Image (cartoon, grey):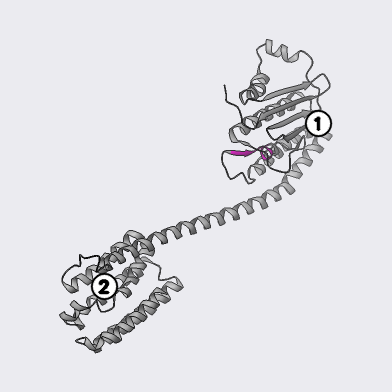
Amino acid sequence: MFRLLSCLYALGFQFAVNPDLDHPLVGWLLFGVLIVVSIVYAIAYLRGFGRRPGWVIVEIVVVLVLMLSTEVIAGDQWVADNQSWPTTLWATNAVISAAIQFGPIAGMLTGLAVMAAAAALKGYVHIDLGRHATLVIELAVGLAVGMAAQTARRAHAELQRAVRLSAALEERERLSRQVHDGAIQVLALMARRGREIGGETGRLAELAGEQERALRRLVSSAETEPADPGIADVGALVRRWASDRVSVSVPAEPVLLDATVAGELIAAVGNALDNSEKHAGPDARAYVLVEDLGDAVTVSVRDDGVGIPDGRLAEAAAEGRLGIAKSIVGRMNWLGGRAELSTGTGAGTEWELTVPRTGGSGD
């Protein structure tokens, strides 16, 4: 639009001053060149192929040459009394093109070049910016348009990145569904049937179970995480432990905690599940329940295994084996929470791990 308006202004200026030129016919021929250049560049920019450094550099050169051609078609008195023949307004197209293509500094430098060509024609430089503000205008156009172009490019790049990320997340979710509906279910079936058959098949069942758990964790880790990297969804983290031997129940809404607190809580849950797998018995199942209590979060880890005989924990502590105390109880104390154990011979084992929403101080 600016190019069109500047051409209309140049046309009016041409009708007004052409009779005063020393070579009016040459003036109209050069104006024809101006119109052709304007049309070519308008099409080039609209179609996109003109938005390249080479095109912009050629446009700047053409503008400067047409400005300097004023000396050929007009006398010294005319040059002294008027602006350059193609009009400074039309020459500003080159300033805008340079600012869009190369940025604000290049736009301002092109504005200086345009004004330098005008000064070369007159043989002097205007220093009264109050009466002759064209220099300021050219610099301001180059700066403003260049900064706007840079901002637009950054916004466009961010939008493209967001679109790519959205597409990647959709594809990852699709693959996750396929893996969950196919490979994970097959591995879970193999693990369950292999344990029922027993014998050598039992070993294959254990391998299938391990791969199933690994796949579940991989699929869960691909889920969308909270926008704030300092926050973690406890429910999503706990779901990674789900398998044919571990049932997980979480609230429908995300259970958000400080990422550090959530990481320590999940590590304690993992230790409890590891103990259950090692000591609860080969046929034992584990159940994990996540509860959002508002000011606190509780994760219960229960199994239906053989349980821990009375006095066994005290005996282990006396022997210097403090795995449970350090890995589970110690973590909860560090977070300012608590770990409660309920167990007994043949009664299974249940850990109730609770952390406050504010996290712990570590003291």
Q: Amino acid at mark 2?
A: Leu
Q: Which mark is residue 199?
A: 1
| Cβ–Cβ under 8 Å for marks 2 and 1 | no
- SS of the residue at dot 2? helix
Q: Residue at x 73, y 27 (%)?
A: 352
Q: Residue furthest top?
A: 318
Q: Residue furthest front?
A: 130
Q: Which label lies toward us, 2 or 1? A: 2
- Above or below, 343 relative to 44: above
Residue 110 is at least partly visible in this image: no
Q: Is residue 209 left or right of residue 361?
A: right
Q: Residue at x 32, y 80 (%)?
A: 34
Q: Residue at x 32, y 59 (%)?
A: 105
Place of residue 115 in the rendered image (x, y in percent of width and height, measured from the top left): 25, 68
Q: Amino acid at mark 1?
A: Gly
Location of the N terminus by quadrant is bottom left
Residue 235 belongs to the span the image colors magenta: yes
Residue range of the region highlighted in magenta in the rendering: 231-237
Which residue is identified by label 2?
Answer: 64
Place of residue 129 in the rendered image (x, y in percent of width and height, measured from the top left): 24, 65
- Front-lying residue, 195 or 134: 134
Residue 75 belongs to the span the image colors magenta: no
